[in-house]
Image (cartoon, rainbow, N blue to C red):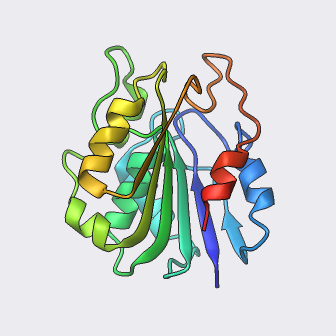
Amino acid sequence: MKNAIILHGTGETPESFWYRYIQANLTWYNHVWLPQLPDKDKPTLEKQVPFVRKSNFVFSDKTVIIAHSAGVPLALSVIERLDIKIKQMVLVAGFIEPLKEGVDGPNFILQEKYNWDKIKSNVDDVILIHSDNDPWGCDHAQGLKMFNNLGGKLVIMHGQGHFGSNTFNQPYKEFPFLLRLVD
């Protein structure tokens, strides 16, 4: 059964930005789960990883994980703990190192270090999407760090900011480019 999970970022909900657009347009999937993650304003691994892992969502070799912002380190942590290889992960405006000074909330979701070999062995296809002007620091430099550890495909887009941010007035309600990348 082809299924997908969409993981939102800090302070967001399933209604934020392009998440419902992607969910509604993945019509070739049997199930697309877009959960409201716990402690959305101050996400932690201790709360969010067990929430995703203990849900009724079944990971398989036909699973795709799509994650945005703080959903990216969460996705990496979940994939690292799987005992099965999934099909694809598409990570948008993610980060693996603390963000700019004064940005604390999302940093609580970071692991001290990642088992990159385990993550790579648990996913067939990795796509990283970043912008060259992300105001939070989830920019192409963070993308390159992930790419250097994971391989896959790194897409750097010009002038796309954070691909959705209420603080910086980036509504980003649709994301057709991302939709074309989902296997």
Is residue 58 positioned above or below 26 on the image? Answer: below
Which part of the image, by quadrant, shows the N terminus? bottom right
Q: Give the number of callouts.
A: 0
- Front residue of 165 and 103: 165
Residue 97 image position (x, y, % from top left): 27, 35
Q: Residue at x 45, y 22 (%)?
A: 136
- Expressed as whole percent of the image width and height from the top left, the position of residue 51 reads 49, 61
Query: Could you say which quadrant of the image residue 179 lies in?
Result: bottom right
Residue 93 location in percent, x, y? 48, 37
107 or 170: nearer the eye? 170
Image location of residue 85, percent across then percent down: 39, 78
For the point 64% across and 79% down, the residue is 2
Return the residue found at the far bottom. Answer: 1
Q: Is residue 25 left or right of residue 144?
A: right
Q: Quadrant of the C terminus?
A: bottom right
Is 159 on the left-hand or right-hand side of 77? right
Q: Nearer the viewer, residue 117 or 11?
A: 117
Q: Residue at x 48, y 61 (%)?
A: 89
Q: Residue at x 55, y 67 (%)?
A: 64
